[in-house]
Image: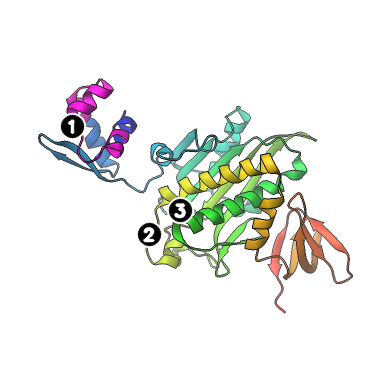
Amino acid sequence: MQEKIIDFLKKADGFISGEDISGALNISRAAIWKYIQELKKEGYEIVAVPHLGYRLESSPDKLFPHEIQFGLSTKVVGKKIVAYDSLDSTMDIAFDLGMHNAPEGTVVLAEGQSRGRGRLGRNWSSPKGKGIYLSIILRPLSSPSEVSRLTLLTAVAVSEAIKQVTGVSALIKWPNDLLVDDKKIAGILTELNAEVDRVKFVVIGIGINVNTRPDALPEGATSLRGILQGPVSRVELTKEILRQVERRYGELNKHGFAAIAQCWKGLSVTLNKRIKITDPGGMIEGVAVDIDKDGGLLIRKDSGVVVKKTAGDVVRVKS
C-alpha cells in the first residue's frame, strides 16, 4: 500500500487530497495518515496541509523496488526486483533464484553487502548506502563459450549509464573493470549455470562505487562522489543501468555481437597496449590486439603467435 500511495504522490501535480487517495485505494483517511508517517520514517519528505492534502517534496536515495521501477519502462530487466537492506552477496541470492526458475530480468539489489565479491573470490567493498550492488538473471539462448560477450556487453552498458547520468567517462579494462583516471570505479562478475552445449542462466553482478568517500575506498579505487565532489543519485543511476543493459542485451539477441564489440573497443584501455595476463595456465606477455567474436582477448606474443584468453588478470606493462 505504501508503494501505491507514493505513486499517487509522484504523479500528482502539486497537492493531492487524502479523500482522493482514500477513494482510489479504498482505505480510510486514518490509514493513509498512518502510511504517510511510515513513509516519512523511511526518508520521504511529505508535506501535509489542511484542506489541500499531501505533497511529496523529496524521495530518499534508497534502492527500494518501487523507486527503481517508477518510470523505468523496461520490458524485461527490472520487471521483478528483490531488494535487501543488507546481505552476504547479491550473487548468491540471484543464483539461488535462477536455480528456482526466476524469470529472466530478475534483479537482486542490496543497500550493503558483508561478503561482496569480485572475480577470483576477491572482496568487493560494499559499504551500506554508498554504492550500487546488484545482480541480474539472464537466460540467453547461447553456448557457454559465448558468455564472455555478456561481461563485455554489461561493461559497455554500465559505462554508458554512468556517462548519461553523471557525464563521467568510465573506460573498460578487459574483462570486467571500469576505470576513471586509471582508478577502479566499477566491476562486473559473471557466473553461469550451464550444460555442455547450453546455458541455463547467467547471473551478472555489478558493483559501483557511487557515494563512498575516496579515503574509505581500497587503494587504486575511486568513486563518482570523489570525482564530482558531490553526491550522485543511486536510484537514477540504477534505473539507467537497467535500461542500458536491456537495450544492449536486446541488440545482442537481434543483431549479434559485432556492434557491441565495436563500442567496447572504443572504450577499451586494454587494446593496443603491452600487457601481462595470468590465468590458471600461467602467464604470458604481449600486445592486446583485439577481441574475437565471443569476447575473448587476443594477445600477440613477441614471437608473433596470437593467443586467445577468455579470462585472466591483466596488468599493463609500462614501456
Where is mark 1, residue-wise?
17
Q: Residues within 10 Å of mark 3 (few under 14, many from 20)?
A: many
Amino acid tagged 1: Ser
Give left or right: position of 151 versus 62. Answer: right
Res. 131 mark: 3
Amino acid tagged 2: Pro
- The reply to whether the magenta stretch includes residue 27 is yes
Q: Quadrant of residue 49?
A: top left
**Vertical relation: 276 (above or below) 254:** below
Res. 237 mark: none
Can you tell which of label 1 and label 2 is closer to the viewer? 1
Dominant secondary structure of the residues highlighted in magenta in the image: helix
In what quadrant of the picture does the C terminus appear? bottom right
Percent coordinates x, y for residue 66 in the rendering: 39, 36
Q: Give the spatial CA distance, label 1 vs label 2.
A: 33 Å
Residue for point 32% across, 47% down: 60
Where is mark 2, residue-wise?
231
Write the start and end of the magenta stretch as one range. 7-32
Q: Residues within 10 Å of mark 1 (few under 14, many from 20)?
A: some
Q: Are marks 1 and 3 in contact (CB under 8 Å)?
A: no
Percent coordinates x, y for residue 211 in the rendering: 42, 58
Residue for point 65% across, 57% down: 264
Amino acid tagged 3: Gly
Q: Give the spatial CA distance, label 1 vs label 3.
A: 36 Å
Give left or right: position of 253 versus 72. Answer: right
Residue 112 seen in render: no
